[in-house]
Image (cartoon, rainbow, N blue to C red):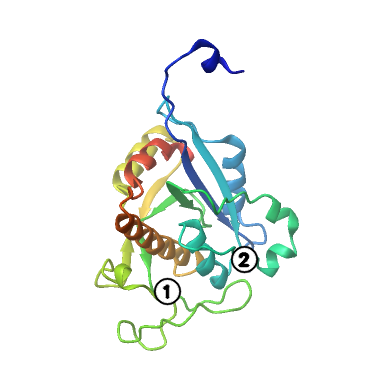
Amino acid sequence: MGDLLDTGATTRRERAVNVLVTGFGAFRSAKKNPSWETAKLLSKRGIPCEDANRQISLDISYVPTEYEYVTEILAHFHGLSDHAPTIPQSLIDDPVVAARSDFDPQKRYDLILHIGQGKSGGVCIETVGHQTGYDKADATDRLAPLIEEPSKSPEGSRGHSVSEVVGRELNTDGELLTQIDTAKLVDTVSKEFTDIKITKSIDAGHYLCDFIFFGSLAAAIQAQDRARAAGTDPARTQKTWRMCYRAL
């Protein structure tokens, strides 16, 4: 212990890369959601870092399959809220699950990875988040909120209402695209893990997986805009992902 201090070594260790991995709770067809089970496994295993001067700090967060909770918690994930997140009844009723979530609202996360349940037979890397089209009820039988800008979306559309800065980033189909080079990611990971089928996807399903993906992309845009306004460095998405891709 204390070797660096005792020897006077000058090795510079940079700030740890903070990574948050989320997994969903149960819903109708998944009483034990594999996305949360995967997040727990990652937490136990940790993530190696290719940069010898850096460490990766990995936190995980259990996300109930509920539109209302996702809408609120994303602001906390991306540092956009100053008040404590509301604890949903599903977490109050299951303290064991809550205890396994170590999300730190005071921490700035460099990379947030949302894991969702998909079809069997491989791993899909989602590339597109959709603002509207959320017509299926969540685990509490509640629907997604109505869009507050009916002039920009068909009347009665359910999904995310967005700020002006996020609205400027939407494509003509009301979608947000990830900044990560997913083609390169799929190619790199496929070469290392040849026994796993890894593909790109443009359809996250218009359910909670899609809902959290779009919402997280939107929150990231807002966080970057706020960082620029404050004169600080926005998140380094590409560099951080290259260091952490082995999380898969």
- Left-right relation of 46 to 97: left
Circle 1 Cα neighbour tier, 10 Å, few/some/many (<14 / 14–19 / ≥20): many
Residue 131 appears in view: yes
**Residue 17 sits in quarter:** top left
x, y (%) of residue 142? 58, 79
Question: Which residue does the image show at 45% across and 37% down from the upper left?
Answer: 246
| Of labels 1 and 2, the one closer to you | 1
Circle number at residue 160: 1
Decide if residue 120 is on the left or right side of residue 164: right
Q: Which residue position is annotated with label 2?
A: 29
* Secondary structure at numbered mark 1: loop
Which quadrant is the N terminus positioned in? top right
Residue located farthest toward the top when viewing the structure as drawn = 7
Between residues 135 and 227, which one lies in front from this camera angle?
A: 227
Q: Earlier in the sequence, mark 1 or mark 2?
A: 2
Number of other residues with Cα within 10 Å of mark 2, as a class: few under 14, some 14 to 19, many 20 or more = few
Q: Position of residue 107 (x, y in %)?
A: 51, 48
Closer to the camera in the image, 21 or 77: 77
The residue closer to the viewer here, 239 or 207, is: 239
45 shown above or below 223: above
Q: Residue at x 57, y 53 (%)?
A: 35
Name the amino acid, label 1. His
Q: Residue at x 43, y 65 (%)?
A: 215
Q: Position of residue 137 (x, y in %)?
A: 56, 77
| In the displayed structure image, the side of residue 78 where residue 100 appears, left or right | right
Q: Residue at x 60, y 52 (%)?
A: 36
Residue 191 figure quarter: top left
Question: CA gap, disc 1 to disc 2?
Answer: 24 Å
Q: Is residue 248 visible?
A: no
